[in-house]
């Protein structure tokens, strides 16, 4: 590839259609049609129907947890979690996560206290939590990131020793294992996302997992469950229900999980092999797990050795129809609703700030095949080789 | 037990006294409308082909356009449920720095909880005994310096005092949000439901007129509000990585639900025609029956004929709750009309205590009878026959119930 062939310099895009980053696995049309026909025959559309019940049972078996409670999406699931756990005051969580984790706290009247992360694993830095604790902190939200884990066993010990409640945003972690134990039953509860971009998809959806009977009963009541379990008192209820259509897709997706995980892992290994030779590109491997879903390909771009800034690389890739993303950007502490307290975090989150400036997410999932991975890696390699020419292009564009 | 009998001849035949059920399958008050399967598949094909399953997909946008057209409003924003649509509309509309939301007590059982999620204090207003809904005067009595929002709720049959409450809000500078969940299809002399007040909120839950599995939407003519609602339902994001406003969450509608709602919207006229037939059957059957009064639809404008609500009058031999229990035992899933009213429920969040005698009285008298796609005219005849049986054997039933209670 000559420099002039870059699409950003006027060449033809490497991909005819925009390649997204999300998983986007979906059942074949025939299976979709059969599942929907079943719903139309039963005429049972929502309110804890037979498919939702079946999904909850399968998830309990698969994840080895006593209660799986399916919900309309993971954000509302996290809100229900904070409500059911009766958290108040402040909760410690990493800022290097999706904004919804922090928003779930704000919706329940809780102030998030942002903790920095470990530079190697990107997971919450447990060593930095103590400095954030005061009498208003009632709990910790661990976030299991990138198909890895935030050392839930250490976090359990840490929170028990300090009498803090602990739960997990495990939106990225479906199917992952820590020392051969499925993520799902650590802390008081865990919340999974079944959004279309996740390995287990209900198009929108999620589930809450817990071994605690009391918490499960509260969660069912807050969700509104139509007959599932006895009602128990809660402060306020919501609508967190999963429909039969969502449950149908999730059940098919659960059937497909082994092959989708396998595909992800194969593509991830291919990325690993191809990217390791490129200066300034560091692929983040799922940390702290013995089994991963490999649903994210995240790299740090070191501008010095790579030759381009992360955002410049993204601009090049987007022009090639590779929808590479900054992820997470700009970090929860710099987002609307939280940045007014930025002065508190000015020097408290150096690793988070650095990762928000350097991380890039690359495509993996249903729309990606081996050839695509080769082409993407080749593009990144060429960017590095032609960094100077690209750099002067960006300089010419005032960027 | 699946054994059923077609009519009851003796009081001991009642299911609540050990007899067989009148209906093998439950007859509920939910619409559960089902569109033609092929039509649902044709819509589904559109999102499957573009491999876009949620996040403001092609069908959600089409649905929003169609619904805006249907309600004759400029904007429609779809949500994962009416509950979260209401919550976000309250968030977006409430006057900053004010703490109270005026709402009827005789309404949806989770309405005060929604206010609690957005940290507004429910202040319950009285209703009008004819419409069972708030009117200008009952809302006006609740306005004070802390009023952030007026939540005007349409009753289950017909509409509330739309013009009076909308005008009151304008005069007093207080935003008005209509809960129009039960009034999707209605029109009044003032026009079509959808464009009144600052915004109107609807549900697409399977039990409602427009079945989208789960879902909801808000209509408005206010461009800024529509934009704000669309941002709030997607974490406050405007494009990639750009969270522009606080207070967002995930309240997105997925594409399968949108496909269902679109297919049902195509067939709405037929559903209303079917509802009309069911309503006529009830109307004819209940005419002249002592002690029970059907709430009649105002047919001077368009109406959905969906919900069947009756009032149990002084001549009815049993209490409303006893009647509901007897019906439920027969698989006739009648429901008490908004009972208990919200101000009588235990609340663990801030609220303004209220003394609402009319609401208390009304909350003891009304019930909903089965309606929707599962209920045939023959079913309705049997339900009416059964109500007549209760009416003519009221004294003996009451006696037996008292005996059972004493044991």
Image (cartoon, coloured by chain):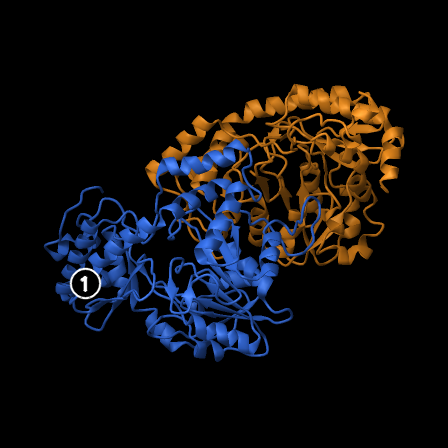
Chain colours: A orange, B blue
Q: Nearer the viewer, residue B201 or A45?
A: B201
Which residue occupies 52% across, 74% down?
Answer: B169
Above or below: residue A161 compared with residue B325: above
Q: Is residue A157 something that shows in the picture?
A: yes
Q: Nearer the viewer, residue A35 or B361?
A: A35
Above or below: residue A212 compared with residue B132: above
Q: Nearer the viewer, residue A6 or B372?
A: A6
Chain where mark 1 sits: B
User: Looking at the picture, how far across and down is residue A17, in whole percent?
Assistant: 64, 29
Q: Nearer the viewer, residue A387 or A117?
A: A387
User: Looking at the picture, how far across and down is residue B129, in whole percent?
Assistant: 34, 75
**Label 1 crowd (10 A; few <14 / some 14-19 / many >=20):** some
Secondary structure under tag 1 reads: helix
The residue furthest front is A10
User: Looking at the picture, how far across and down is residue B386, in whole percent?
Assistant: 17, 57
Residue at the disc numbered 1:
B286
The image quarter in which residue A171 lies:
top right
Left or right of A323: which side holds A353? right
The image quarter in which residue A41 lies:
top left
Above or below: residue A89 compared with residue A278: below
Q: Is residue A164 something that shows in the picture?
A: no
User: Looking at the picture, how far across and down is residue B261, in whole percent?
Assistant: 43, 46
Which residue occupies 80% across, 20% down?
Answer: A1
Quadrant into which the C terminus of chain B falls: bottom left
Quadrant into which the N terminus of chain B falls: top left
Above or below: residue B135 compared with residue A397: below
């Amino acid at each position: 590839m000559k420099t002039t062939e870059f699409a950003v310099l006027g060449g033809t895009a490497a991909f005819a259609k925009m390649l997204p980053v999300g998983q986007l696995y979906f059942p074949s049309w025939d299976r979709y049609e059969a599942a929907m026909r079943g719903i139309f025959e039963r005429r049972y559309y929502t309110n804890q129907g037979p498919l939702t019940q079946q999904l909850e049972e399968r998830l309990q078996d698969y994840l080895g947890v006593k209660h799986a409670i399916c919900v309309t999406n993971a954000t509302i699931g996290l809100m229900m979690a904070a409500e059911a756990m009766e958290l108040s005051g402040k909760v410690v969580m990493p800022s290097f996560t999706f904004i919804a984790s922090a928003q779930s706290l704000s919706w329940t009247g809780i102030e998030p206290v942002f903790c920095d992360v470990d530079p190697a694993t990107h997971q919450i830095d447990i060593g930095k939590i103590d400095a954030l604790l005061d009498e208003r902190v009632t709990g910790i939200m661990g976030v299991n990131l990138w198909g890895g884990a935030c050392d839930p066993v250490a976090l359990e010990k840490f929170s028990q020793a300090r009498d803090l409640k602990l739960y997990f945003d495990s939106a990225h972690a479906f199917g992952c294992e820590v020392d051969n134990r499925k993520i799902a039953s650590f802390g008081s509860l865990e919340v999974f996302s079944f959004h279309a971009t996740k390995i287990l998809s209900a198009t929108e959806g999620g589930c809450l997992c817990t071994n605690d009977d009391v918490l499960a009963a509260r969660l069912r009541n807050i969700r509104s469950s139509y007959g599932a379990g006895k009602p128990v008192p809660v402060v306020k209820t919501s609508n967190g229900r999963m429909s039969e259509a969502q449950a149908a897709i999730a059940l098919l997706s659960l059937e497909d999980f082994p092959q989708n995980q396998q595909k992800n892992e194969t593509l991830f290994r291919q990325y690993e092999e191809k990217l390791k030779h490129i200066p300034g590109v560091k692929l983040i491997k799922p940390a702290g797990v013995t089994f991963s879903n490999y649903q994210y390909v995240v790299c740090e771009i070191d501008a010095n050795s790579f030759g381009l800034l992360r955002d410049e690389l993204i601009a090049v890739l987007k022009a090639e129809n590779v929808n590479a993303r900054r992820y997470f950007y700009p970090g929860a502490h710099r987002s609307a609703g939280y940045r007014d307290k930025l002065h508190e975090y000015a020097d408290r989150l150096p690793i988070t700030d650095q990762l928000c400036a350097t991380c890039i997410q690359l495509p993996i999932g249903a729309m990606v095949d081996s050839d695509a991975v080769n082409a993407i890696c080749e593009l990144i390699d060429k960017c590095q080789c032609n960094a100077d020419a690209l750099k002067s292009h960006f300089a010419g564009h005032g960027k | 037990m699946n054994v059923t009998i077609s009519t009851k001849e003796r009081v001991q035949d009642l299911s609540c006294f050990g007899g067989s059920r009148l209906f093998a399958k439950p007859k509920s008050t939910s619409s559960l409308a089902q569109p033609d399967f092929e039509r649902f598949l044709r819509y589904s094909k559109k999102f499957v082909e573009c491999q876009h399953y949620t996040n403001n997909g092609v069908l959600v946008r089409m649905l929003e356009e169609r619904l805006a057209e249907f309600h004759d409003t400029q904007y429609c924003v779809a949500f994962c449920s009416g509950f979260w649509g209401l919550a976000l509309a309250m968030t977006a509309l409430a006057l900053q720095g004010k703490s109270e939301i005026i709402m009827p007590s005789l309404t949806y059982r989770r309405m005060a909880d929604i206010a609690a999620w957005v940290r507004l204090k429910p202040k319950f207003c009285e209703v009008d005994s004819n419409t069972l809904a708030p009117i200008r005067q009952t809302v006006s009595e609740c306005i004070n310096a802390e009023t952030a929002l007026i939540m005007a709720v349409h009753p289950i049959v017909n509409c509330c005092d739309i013009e009076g409450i909308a005008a009151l809000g304008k005069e007093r500078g207080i935003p008005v949000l209509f809960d129009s969940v039960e009034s999707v299809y209605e029109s009044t002399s003032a026009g079509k439901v959808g464009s009144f007040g600052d915004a109107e909120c609807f549900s697409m839950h399977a039990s409602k007129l427009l079945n989208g599995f789960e879902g909801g939407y808000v209509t408005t003519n206010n461009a800024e509000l529509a934009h704000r609602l669309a941002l709030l339902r997607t974490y406050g994001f405007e494009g990639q990585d750009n969270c522009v406003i606080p207070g967002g969450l995930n309240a997105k509608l997925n594409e399968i639900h949108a496909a269902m709602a679109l297919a049902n919207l195509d067939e709405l006229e037929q559903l209303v025609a079917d509802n009309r037939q069911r309503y006529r059957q009830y109307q004819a059957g209940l005419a002249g029956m002592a002690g029970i009064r059907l709430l009649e639809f105002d047919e001077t404008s368009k109406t959905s004929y969906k919900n069947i609500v009756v009032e149990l009058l002084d001549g009815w031999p049993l209490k409303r709750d006893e009647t509901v229990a007897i019906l439920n035992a027969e698989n006739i899933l009648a429901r008490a009309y908004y009972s208990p009213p919200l101000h009588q429920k235990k609340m663990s969040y801030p609220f303004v205590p209220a003394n609402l005698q009319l609401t208390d009285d009304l909350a003891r008298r009304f019930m909903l009878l089965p309606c929707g796609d599962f209920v045939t005219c023959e079913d309705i005849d049997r339900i009416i026959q059964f109500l007549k049986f209760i009416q003519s054997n009221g004294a003996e039933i009451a006696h037996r119930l008292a005996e059972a209670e004493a044991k």
